[in-house]
Image (cartoon, grey):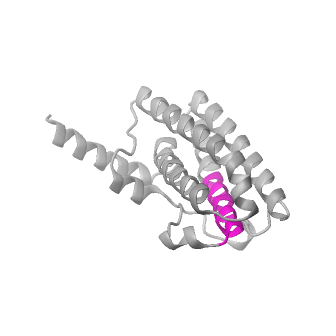
């Protein structure tokens, strides 16, 4: 099989995995979300004004460093277990569930910061689903890694919501408001 045939087989398997969710399929979403979120953090750190710029000057680099390390670890876990990973810009765009808008960089700093919090929250939906699938598929190292990622994200949500003067879940996804469990 040549390189193109191998890649086409990978795409076909990925499509199958996404229709019958597997931990590996959920990981494609998580990895893409991390990549896009890192871009959004960088953008907000450059353009946010007011108190949000101070918060980001203290936290953006830590967030970026953590997300980059997590991105690399998750890619290694997948490849080490024979799973495919998103490798093209088109795949990142297809798999991410984070919203992007170039005009956001001109929004108020607090609005940019809250958008990052909502992105963290969106990521938790995929992470919790992937943890359950990893446990079901007897993939303990993935479940452990994702559990640590989930705990870190929840802490960042709490810290940022506190900074913004919000209650912990204010403005974030509420499962009771959505009957659609499909990803």
User: Which picture quadrant has residue 160?
Assistant: bottom right
Q: How many marks?
A: 0
84 w.r.t. 167: above or below: above
Residue closer to the observer: 146 or 87:
87
Q: What span is colored magenta in the figure?
A: 108-125
Query: Is 34 left, or right, of 151 in this rendering?
Result: left
Q: Is residue 53 left or right of residue 165?
A: left
Q: Is residue 132 visible?
A: no
Q: Position of residue 102 (x, y in %)?
A: 48, 69
Task: Give percent across and percent down for residue 96.
Answer: 48, 57
Q: Is residue 137 magenta?
A: no
Left or right of 97? Residue 19 is left
Please tell me which residue lies in front, 171 or 64: 64
Q: Quadrant of the N terminus?
A: top left
- From this viewpoint, which residue is outermost toward the left? 2
* Vertical side of 100 occupied by 90: above or below: above
Residue 88: x percent and y percent?
33, 49
Q: Is residue 130 visible?
A: yes
Query: Which residue is at a point 67% across and 65% down the rendered structure image?
Result: 49
Q: Classify residue 107 by image quadrant.
A: bottom right
Principal secondary structure, stretch drawn in magenta: helix
**Vertical arrangement, residue 122 with respect to residue 82, above or below:** below
Q: Position of residue 159 (x, y in %)?
A: 80, 51
Question: Which is more toward the observer, 65 or 36?
Answer: 65
């Amino acid at each position: 099989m040549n390189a193109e045939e191998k890649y086409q087989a990978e795409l076909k398997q990925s499509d199958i995995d996404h229709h019958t969710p597997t931990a590996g399929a959920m990981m494609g979403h998580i990895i893409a979300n991390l990549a896009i979120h890192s871009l959004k953090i960088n953008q907000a750190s450059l353009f946010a004004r007011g108190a949000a710029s101070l918060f980001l000057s203290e936290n953006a680099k830590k967030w970026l460093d953590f997300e980059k390390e997590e991105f690399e670890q998750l890619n290694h876990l997948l490849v080490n277990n024979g799973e495919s990973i998103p490798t093209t810009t088109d795949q990142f765009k297809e798999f991410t569930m984070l919203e992007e808008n170039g005009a956001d960089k001109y929004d108020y700093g607090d609005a940019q910061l809250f958008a990052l919090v909502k992105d963290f929250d969106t990521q938790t939906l995929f992470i919790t689903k992937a943890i359950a699938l990893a446990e079901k598929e007897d993939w303990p190292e993935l479940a452990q890694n994702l559990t640590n990622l989930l705990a870190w994200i929840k802490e960042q949500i709490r810290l940022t919501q506190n900074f913004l003067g919000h209650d912990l879940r204010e403005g974030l996804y509420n499962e009771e408001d959505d009957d659609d469990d499909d990803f």
